[in-house]
Amino acid sequence: MKLRLLTASTFTAGLAAVFGCGGGSSYTAPSTANTPTITIVGQNGTQAFTPNPAMFGGQQVVFKNNTSTTHRVVLNDGSVDTGNIAPGASSPAVTMPGSGGNYHCSIHPGMIGSTSAASGAPPPSCEGPYCTPY
Ligand SMILES: [Cu+2]
């Protein structure tokens, strides 16, 4: 297990080196390496996302899909949409509202989660159609 992790990170470093030698190009691809991750673990209501609630108000986060089904995370007010996240893939980095918020999977609306406010205050109470877990 440790060897496999080492190999993967060596491979990633090698890739970065290859892309880093872009013949003088100054473009640097956005890195999500240090972005907090919310992991999608199943289609089970408030247990679908971990951590949940997450203390990521006002921050960029990445959703990582650890299930075998495509998911799409949408903030209940529509202000954030990850697009489809294939099994095993991660979403682009999206910015959670500073006041905290509630989100769901638009494909499986019973998958629900929330982020706290940037101040650490709990998420706003969930209102509307995407508040009922299954
Ligand atoms: Cu889903």
Image (cartoon, rainbow, N blue to C red):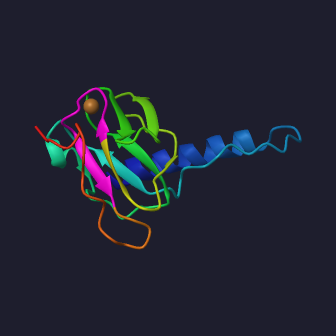
Task: Name the residue nearer the viewer: 8 or 106.
Answer: 106
Count of all numbered marks drawn on residues in the image: 0
> Quadrant of residue 65 in the image?
top left
Residue 75 is situated, as x and y percent measured from the top left of the image, at: 38, 42
Task: From this view, report whether residue 58 is shown above or below residue 3.
Answer: below
Q: Residue at x 52, y 58 (%)?
A: 34
Q: Residue furthest left?
A: 134
Tell me if residue 105 is in the magenta stretch.
yes
**Residue at the front extreme?**
128
Towards the viewer: 19 or 132: 132
For ligand 1, which image quadrant applies? top left
Residue span colored magenta? 104-115
Residue plotted at (47% across, 45% down)? 8
33 in the magenta segment: no
Q: Quadrant of the C terminus?
A: top left
Q: Is residue 34 left or right of residue 49?
A: right
Horizontally, residue 99 falls left or right of residue 22, namely: left
x then y, percent, for residue 79: 47, 42
Q: Position of residue 61 (x, y in %)?
A: 46, 52
Q: Residue at x 84, y 45 (%)?
A: 26
* Residue 47 falls left or right of residue 105: left
Q: Quadrant of residue 19?
A: top right
Image coordinates of residue 103 in percent, x first then y, are: 32, 44
Q: Residue at x 37, y 72 (%)?
A: 120
| Frontmost residue, 44 versus 12 | 44
